[in-house]
Amino acid sequence: MDALLPVIKPGLVHLPASTLRDHALLFFGSGRMVKHLNPIRIPKITNVKAEAHKQVSTAPIIDFRDPDWKSKYELDFEARFNIPHITDVLPDAVSYPSTFCLKMRTPVSPDFAEGYPSDEEWHGYINNNDRVLLKVIRYSSPTSAGAECIDPDCTWLEQWVHRAGPREKIYFKPEDVKAAIVTCGGLCPGLNDVIRQIVITLEIYGVKKIFGIPFGYRGFSDKSLAEMPLSRKVVQNIHLSGGSLLGVSRGGPSVSDIVDSMEKRGINMLFVLGGNGTHAGANAIHEECNKRRLKVAVVGVPKTIDNDILLMDKTFGFDTAVEEAQRAINSAYIEAHSAYHGIGIVKLMGRSSGFIAMQASLASGQIDICLIPEVPFNLHGPHGVLSHLKYLLETKGSAVVCVAEGAGQDFLEKINAKDASGNIILGDIGVHMQQETKKYFKGIGFPADVKYIDPTYMIRACRANASDGILCTVLGQNAVHGAFAGYSGITVGICNTHYVYFPIPEVIAQPKVVDPNSRMWHRCLTSTGQPDFV
Ligand SMILES: Nc1ncnc2c1ncn2[C@@H]1O[C@H](COP(=O)(O)OP(=O)(O)O)[C@@H](O)[C@H]1O
Ligand SMILES: O=P(O)(O)OC[C@H]1O[C@](O)(COP(=O)(O)O)[C@@H](O)[C@@H]1O
Ligand SMILES: [Mg+2]
């Protein structure tokens, strides 16, 4: 399907910002865009779902006739990725020398009358002008696999984002800080690791008042839920188990009620652990604080097992989920392989993004068919999944299918319901596939032994593996550094193996999805050997 890019005036192309930076593969056809007088079509954007989301974010205007369009684009990018600071609304906010110094773990003076002691020799701080490159591949042609091009020549554009880490100047005196941590949405391996590291780092800065808000945003309004005092002692071993020490929830009070509650409690640093929805809330809280001219730092740490947050290499918990999924896939494989004409079906999480299913299939090497929300497929018909399953039984004797929960929703009756956060409640594609598979083979009188495994909540509830443990630790530390540096309305992430701060709106403009034209999806197809089911 073609995507339409409206021309504002001849030669002036209005591109959704996210089109410029995300995973869709853009082919610009022949000739330069500036020659078109009619709306420009960019063929071959196969991810229609992703494109639909893309209309929401800000839309820079690029005039490719302008010889300076490249530098203008880069400047515009710099502005978009500027990270909000409390001095934007409170220009008189005072800074102090940082109390975070590894050679001096606790502040020596209780009242800091002479300012905070710091170690001049310690080169452990990040300069505010340090930047990390967001995109590191220089594509020579729009036809290169996975190419993300802005113009037909695929011009190299520098897209810099802010480097995360401790700053030499801080905007909060530790003794004036009341910090709160809240975890929202569904569970995700590593939540406790992040909570633990935020608490430990806050204590290193010298903060004494640290609290957990129980059960997500609900904890701000539910009078029966008391704040949970946190300290290194409380959090020391919490990373040894999954879940969240603080509890999670969906839905909850309005943003203005949350900020009222924060004001009442005297919270001036808020660490928000959650996904797209939570971050939308965090950004709204940050904006409400700005409106009320409150000196508050709101910092997010992206939590999503689905890995559906834009611009980062990955989110914490994702690696663990992929690893844990191996157990389910292997069991399905053993069952299928040991049965006469055995078929194993495994459903994995992924509401709108098939990252877990794709990576878990790739990692296992045991999957014959991987189905994700981003790639349409037919179940029935000569090119459908079911007839391929028959072929696999005939040729291999068994087959294993991995299906993401958001895949094939068109086959299911719409539930027309939403959860407390407003997320659409999906039909169960795993159960549907199990039933359809059984029905199909019975119908054609071909023996098949179908086993279905749904490990979704088991995967989500487990503790983080070692690589996620490290990621959580660094993200948690950087969240605290960002708050002390006076940034607010930001979130932390890993980008090309470096740690960065992003302005929240840029990472939640739409869910990150698997690009069906990406090398990774092609690798997955190479591994499964599956055909197109269309
Ligand atoms: N657009 C929004 N503005 C403010 N709060 C939101 C928004 N979307 C979701 N939330 C709140 O964020 C929390 C978590 O959202 P949810 O979608 O359940 O999980 P996740 O953050 O993992 O995507 C819920 O308490 C929900 O009410
Ligand atoms: O049953 P629950 O708790 O609503 O969670 C189900 C959802 O949780 C997820 O794992 C993650 O969703 P969130 O990132 O919104 O927490 C989705 O894949 C899944 O649809
Ligand atoms: Mg979500």
Image (cartoon, rainbow, N blue to C red):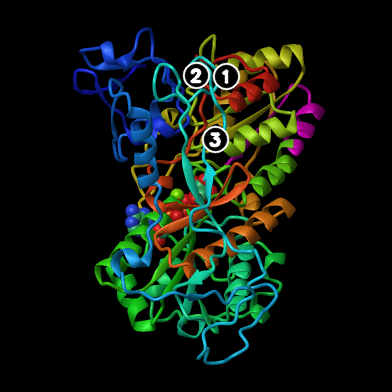
Residue 429, compared with residue 216, is above or below; it is: above
**Residue 476: mark in rendering:** none
Q: Name the residue under label 2.
A: 378
Q: In percent of the image, x 35 and y 46: which residue is there?
A: 79
Q: Quadrant for the N terminus, please.
A: top left
Q: What residue type is labelled 1?
A: Val
Q: In percent of the image, x 58 and y 18: which residue is there?
A: 386
Marks 1 and 2: CB-CB under 8 Å?
A: yes
Instruction: From the viewer's perspective, tell me whether residue 334 is left or right of residue 42.
Output: right
Residue sitting nearer the eye, 61 or 373 = 61
Q: Name the residue under label 3.
A: 354
Q: In percent of the image, x 40 and y 47: which residue is there?
A: 81
Q: Could you classify mark 3 by the number of other residues whose Cα lies within 10 Å: few (under 14), some (14-19), or many (20 or more)?
A: many
Q: Position of residue 101 (x, y in %)?
A: 64, 73
Q: Mark 1 points at which residue?
A: 385
Q: Magenta stretch: give its range.
A: 330-348
Can residue 54 be spotted in the picture?
no
